[in-house]
Image (cartoon, rainbow, N blue to C red):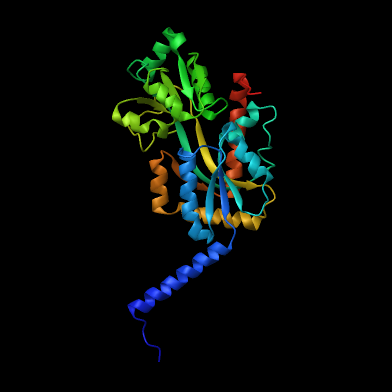
Amino acid sequence: MKLPLNRRQVALSIGLMAAGGFAQAQDKPAVRILVGFAPGGSADILARLLAEKLRPVLRQNVIVENKPGAAGRLALGDLKRAAPDGLTLCLVGGAALVALPWVFKNVGYDPFKDFAPVAGVTTFDFALTAGPGAPPGDLKALLAWMKTNPGKASYGHSGAGTLPHFTGYLIAQATGVPMTHVPYKGAAPAVQDLLAGQIPLVIDTAAETMEHHRAGRLRIVAVTGEKRSRLLPEVPTMKEAGVDVTSDGFLALYGPSGMTPELVTRLSSAVAEVMKLADTQERIAALGQQASYSTAVDLARMQAAHYRRWEAPIKASGFTAD
């Protein structure tokens, strides 16, 4: 007859199982998640969250490698050259796949042939934020001021050829108010100049200015989504404010082309399991983004739709980065 285990035996048993699982994970090669941006930004924080949550699901170590530069193109270059064994993934900002190919004559990769969609992770809108260099009031008052002060009608953003850059172009086209774009090497220095009054406006994700908005240092005038942000329910959408513009972006995991369907399914299913966790969703919301898992097939469709959507405005802007 089997005797029941006492607490010490149970604890020892659990410890041995955990140690066995850890050893099993250590026996497997680590999965790398490449990030095309510097540490500390929202993409980097999200990648580290995914790595933390994926380790126990995949039962192997998952590490993050930052490859900042060229608006994410350096990381995608590394991904393109990686073996299709599921050990190298990249958390890609949608702009690198749907905007930059229209901006560069030779972007260095084919956005559809060189990468394998794995899973959509988040979606997000952009925000038009006014600083002390802009007058008080709503979007209508701001546009009137810009129209009568064309030399001051400028907006900072996180880099030439990015979606915030072209969102400003869409706003200018929709309102008939010319706006000069001022590119920065990331959103952080743009926001610093906004706080200092060096530029009147910034267009970027709401997460970049949300805390300043809440503290009264800056003012988010409007967001670019189809509906109001749950984190900023007091801020109207562009459409509500009378400007017919919507704009959004996404972050997603991709692998190199050539991955087997079975491998893609395994990785995508692991991401789906992670995205169901309440803690994951809460931490993504704190970044000002929407947890939005999509399968590899749905991600490929979303990428194609965004690619077609941005072709006309980017070509109409006349902007090229070459």
The answer to whether residue 242 is seen in the rendering is no
Q: Could you tell me which residue is drawn at 42 percent across and 12 percent down?
A: 146
Q: Residue furthest top?
A: 148
Is residue 22 depicted above or below 2 in this figure? above
- Classify the position of the C terminus by image quarter: top right
Q: Could you tell me which residue is drawn at 57 percent across and 56 percent down?
A: 30
- Relative placement, left or right, of 187 versus 68 is left
Residue 245: image x %, image y %?
Answer: 48, 25
Is residue 68 depicted above or below 167 in this figure? below
- Classify the position of the N terminus by image quarter: bottom left
Numbered disc total: 0
Corner quadrant of residue 211: top left
Residue 177: image x %, image y %?
Answer: 48, 13
Q: Residue furthest bottom?
A: 1
Is residue 250 depicted above or below 150 in this figure? below
Q: Could you tell me which residue is drawn at 40 percent across and 25 percent down?
A: 192
User: Considering depth in this image, is 151 or 20 the residue closer to the camera?
Assistant: 20
Residue 148: image x %, image y %?
Answer: 42, 7
The answer to whether residue 296 is seen in the rendering is yes
User: Considering depth in this image, is 34 or 224 the residue closer to the camera?
Assistant: 34
